[in-house]
Image (cartoon, rainbow, N blue to C red):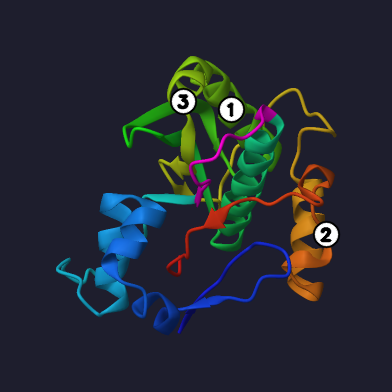
Amino acid sequence: MNFASSRSGRAPVRVGEVARLSEATLVSMLGRASGRHLHALAHNRDPRPVQPGRRRRSIGSQCALGRGSRAREDVDAVLVGLVDRVTRRMRAAGRVGRTVLLRLRFGDYSRATRSHTLPRATAHTQTILVTARWLMAAATPLIEQKGLTLVGVAVGGLEDDLAVQLWLPFDRHGGTTLDAALDEIRERFGAAAVTRAVLLGRRQGLLVPLLPD
C-alpha cells in the first residue's frame, strides 16, 4: 500500500517510509494531532470501529510550509494546488460538497479554521478556489501577525453527484467542462501531464500523505 502524492514529479510516499519516521519527527512536520494520528496508522493502530459502506463526510488535503516566511503569492500557489488536488479527488469519487473549510496553523502552533457554505453542492475547481481565497484573505491579519506554517483545504457536506441541479443562468465559463477535460488528460497521461501556470517552478511545501477515499 502507498500514499499518493500530487506533487509533480514526486514519487508516492509508502506506508513503510512513514513508519520508519519517529512520532516526534511526524509531529514536527504535521503538528501534534496529525503527526500522532499518522504515526499510529502507519503502525496499524486505529481504535475507530470499522463501519462498512459508510462514506467520508469531507475530503481535504493540507500542506506543511515550514517556519520560514513566505510571500503572499507563494501561499496562494499552495492554496491553488490544494484546491486542485481536493476537487480532483471529489470528482474521481463522484462526490460534491457545499462547505469549504480553510485550516491554518501559525508560527506559535495555534490554529484557526474558517468555513463558508455555498448555496449548492459542487466539485467545480474555480468555485471552490474563489471561496478558499476569500477565506484566506479574511485571515490575512492573523497570518501577518503570527506567521503561517500549514495550510489545509477541505470540502464538507458531501453528497453523491448523481443528481446535481444546474445553476441558472447557464454560463459556458462557469461549468465543469474544463475540469472534466483536465481530469481526462491526467487520467490518461499522469498527474504531471498538465498543471496550472501559477504552480510552475514553485515549491508547494510538504504535502501530507493521503488515505484512500
Report the residue at 58% width, 27% height from top.
131
Q: Tag 3 or tag 2, which sits nearer the N-term?
A: 3
| Neighbours of disc 3 within 10 Å: few (<14), some (14-19), many (20+) | some
- Residue 194, percent across and down? 83, 59
Give the main secondary structure, helix, strand or loop, of the magenta stretch. Answer: loop
* In this view, the mark in front (2 or 3): 2
Whether pointer 2 and pointer 3 mark residues with C-beta atoms closer than 8 Å, the reply is no
Report which residue position mark 2 lands on. Answer: 194
Does the segment drawn in magenta span residue 211? no
The disc labelled 3 sits on which kind of residue?
A: His
- Residue 92, percent across and down? 60, 62
> Horizontal placement of 140 versus 203: left or right?
left
Look at the picture and state if 62 lies above or below 103.
below
Look at the picture and state if 188 lies above or below 60.
below
Whether pointer 3 and pointer 1 mark residues with C-beta atoms closer than 8 Å, the reply is yes
The answer for how far apart the CA atoms under marks 2 and 3 are is 29 Å
> Horizontal placement of 20 versus 132: left or right?
left
Q: Is residue 166 visible?
A: no
Report which residue position mark 1 lands on. Answer: 131
- Residue 57, percent across and down? 36, 50
Q: Tag 1 or tag 3, which sits nearer the N-term?
A: 3
The disc labelled 1 sits on which kind of residue?
A: Thr
Question: In the image, which disc is placed on residue 116?
Answer: 3
Q: Please state the extent of the stretch shown in magenta in the rendering.
A: 63-72
Look at the picture and state if 158 lies above or below 108.
below
